[in-house]
Amino acid sequence: MNACLWVSASDKMQIGDFRAFANSEKPTLRGDVVRIQDVGERELISVIHRLQAQVPLGYVGIGDDAAYLPPSSSGTLISQDMLVENVHFRVDWTTAEQLGEKAVAVNISDIAAMGGQPVALLTSLSVPGNLDVQWVEDLYRGIAKALDWYGAVLVGGDTVGSTDRIALDVTVIGRPGPTGPIWRTGAKPGDRIFVTGRLGAAYAGYLLLSHGTTWPSTVLSERSVMMAHLSPVARIQMGLAMASWAHAMTDVSDGLVVELEEITRFGSIGATIWQDSLPIDAATRAMAERFGGDPVDFALFGGEDYELVAIIPPSRVSEVLSSATRCGVAVTEVGVITESPGIRIAGTTGGGERVVYGHGFNHFSLA
């Protein structure tokens, strides 16, 4: 992978240069406001660099034309995602540090969905020149905190100016677990559908924020769902555990129905979701009632939960439940893969089934 770092061949900055700036007597970022346009790209990069952990032995990170990671006999997982201001986040809803943590988590969630382990990240940041340098420092402090939690390191990226909004592009590099990568395809009729954690909470948090409630709320239920939206968790350990038995796996970024449509797209198969089994917590139900919504719809279509959906053969259900206990992560059996194509919802006890269709977020429908 030939990744462009924060330096170019014509304007190369060595690691010693970064450290020199980090230790020099520049205007403090904790005092008077310092704008990005005042310090320039080189000094901004040094701020980012000094917040990150030292890369492991054998790696080359920030400071050369490209990063280097030692080869892996098991192969490499690579995923990329972009967060754009007023599309994926709003600066009046989230702190810069929260955004940094979320950017890492949502990208590493893709590695978790493949049953892998994250290794390294690259980030490309586009920001207006009049933005406070402190905001960027807080962003990369959040990134560093999350990377430390997930056991990965930042090895490079790019910074560019923007005329009107912030955009953060993240590339994550990972390695498959011992059983190799787990694909979305591979589900078989009779397999059970498991999800980690809770569903619908992130959408409930989004509704709350969009109606003017600010973080942090003093109301426990409000804080709970806002946390789900602002600070999701990538289920790395549970992904590694379930990879030993899963026929297919993905994460819930666009809603459970959309993800199951992807899983069942090939093979002339479908899925039935048991409505009564959906893991919808009390806080999410309270927000649904408050805003006149159906909590089941929150769980099925809300998205951005970043929980895992794993397709497990019936003979391995007990192992999954045991692994969940060891990992301290709740898992719930919510349905079954069927021979009939389409996604169906089994109604409440004694009720019938209804066919549903996903309606995930369409980026290109934005005005």
Image (cartoon, rainbow, N blue to C red):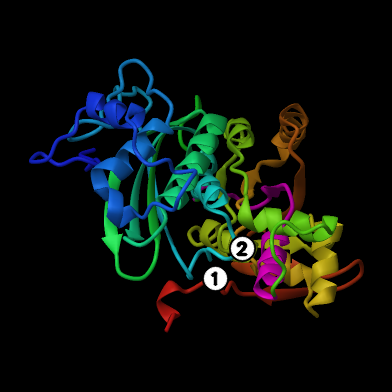
Q: Is residue 4 visible?
A: yes
Horizontal placement of 361 versus 8: left or right? Answer: right
Disc 2 and disc 1: Cα gap in Å? 8 Å
Q: In which quarter of the image is the N terminus?
A: top left
* Residue 140 picture location, percent across and down: 45, 42
- Dot 1: what SS? loop
Identify the residue at horizontal 77%, vertical 54% (top origin).
Answer: 224
Q: Which of 30 and 152 is in front in this view?
A: 30
Instruction: Residue lying at the far top in this picture: please name it.
Output: 57
Which quadrant would residue 257 be assigned to in this image? bottom right
* Cβ atoms under marks 2 and 1 closer than 8 Å: yes
Q: In which quarter of the image is the C terminus?
A: bottom left
Please provide percent x and percent y for residue 148.
Answer: 52, 30
Specify the quadrant of the image occupied by residue 290. Answer: bottom right
On residue 191, the disc is none
Q: Residue 360 carries which label?
A: 1
Q: Give the range drawn in magenta.
A: 185-211
Horizontally, residue 222 falls left or right of residue 83, namely right
Q: The residue under label 2 is which amino acid type?
A: Gly
Characterize the local packing of mark 2: few (<14), some (14-19) or many (20 or more) Cα atoms within 10 angstroms. Answer: many
Residue 353: x and y in percent read 77, 73
Is 305 in the magenta?
A: no
Which of the two labelled residues, at mark 2 and mark 1, occupies the earlier sequence position?
Answer: 2
